[in-house]
Amino acid sequence: MRGTVVTSEQGITVGAWETQLRKGVAEIAVLAVIAREETYGYRIVEVLREFEGLALSESTVYPVLTRLANDGLLAVRTEASPAGPRRRYYSLTSSGQRRLYDLQESWQKVSGSLATLFKGVAR
Amino acid sequence: MRGTVVTSEQGITVGAWETQLRKGVAEIAVLAVIAREETYGYRIVEVLREFEGLALSESTVYPVLTRLANDGLLAVRTEASPAGPRRRYYSLTSSGQRRLYDLQESWQKVSGSLATLFKGVAR
DNA sequence: TGTTACTACTGTGCCTCGCATAGTAGACAG
DNA sequence: CTGTCTACTATGCGAGGCACAGTAGTAACA
């Protein structure tokens, strides 16, 4: 019932993500890092390690990248590394940008709701 | 590695929750509702339905309550309902209050980190 | 030259959680 | 006595995070 239903034509979208939010953050964090600058998996792991509470292991990031790319949210390009195997550089497609925007909206709602909820809690 | 390790004696704690955060919000939302006032499962579902992005179904809330109670974070008391089966009223134990506080801390960190991350994103 | 270390990505499998679905049961209105 | 709220219980699935393991490229060092 309610908005949980995926309205047929758009597959996995924000509605489904709001379900996923509670297992998530990973997707939005990865998208945000890529939105700042085209980059590759190993680097994303390093970058997110600098953000408290957002650290993700490689075994989380790589599958996310694969999934997002399969969903058409990311474009890929490979380039030789000066110190290792070829890097797979990811950038946002227009759907990817749109998705990031939508996820940010959802995040704001949840975040705002939680803040409101916390206000009623004596500490 | 890092804080993900469960330091033997305290079982599932904040470290583990920071793993769980990404599937979570449910736990912190439920704890927060109970912190405001002693209440029961069905009512929690109703209350959270009023918060955008925090709506949880009964099949999510009840298992959460059971788990939190088993972990000693909630105390239970039953009371007859004027219009249905007996209600199971939950309140926070001192561990529960402590846990809620810790979860709020973690939430702030993640939330703040995401906000910082978003700042670097052109829109 | 072979060992170590860092870079960079791939693959497998487990465990937890959210949730859809279904069921039980009390109270009460028509 | 049927339907509709209220209130909780039980089952099972799918998705995702992550630990763990493996492969491979580059380079320093003995």
Image (spheres, coloured by chain):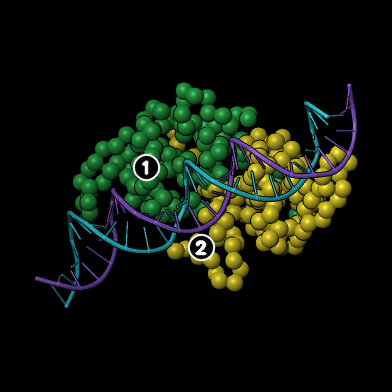
Chain colours: A green, B yellow, C purple, D cyan
Q: Nearer the viewer, residue B75 or C24?
A: C24
Identified at 46% across, 29% down, the residue is: A11
Secondary structure category for the residue under label 2: helix
* Residue A61 horizontal side relative to residue B87, left or right: left
Subunit of label 2? B
Question: Eyeballing the image, is D12 above or below A74?
Answer: below
Q: Quadrant of the C terminus of chain A?
A: bottom right
Q: Quadrant of the N terminus of chain A?
A: top right
Identified at 69% across, 54% down, the residue is: B66
Q: Residues within 10 Å of mark 2 (few under 14, many from 20)?
A: few
Q: Amino acid at mark 1?
A: Leu
Q: Nearer the viewer, residue B18 or B117?
A: B18
Residue A40 position, x and y percent, is 32, 45
Residue A43 position, x and y percent, is 34, 49
Task: Identify the disc placed on residue B3.
Answer: 2
* Residue C20 horizontal side relative to residue B83, left or right: left
Secondary structure category for the residue under label 1: helix
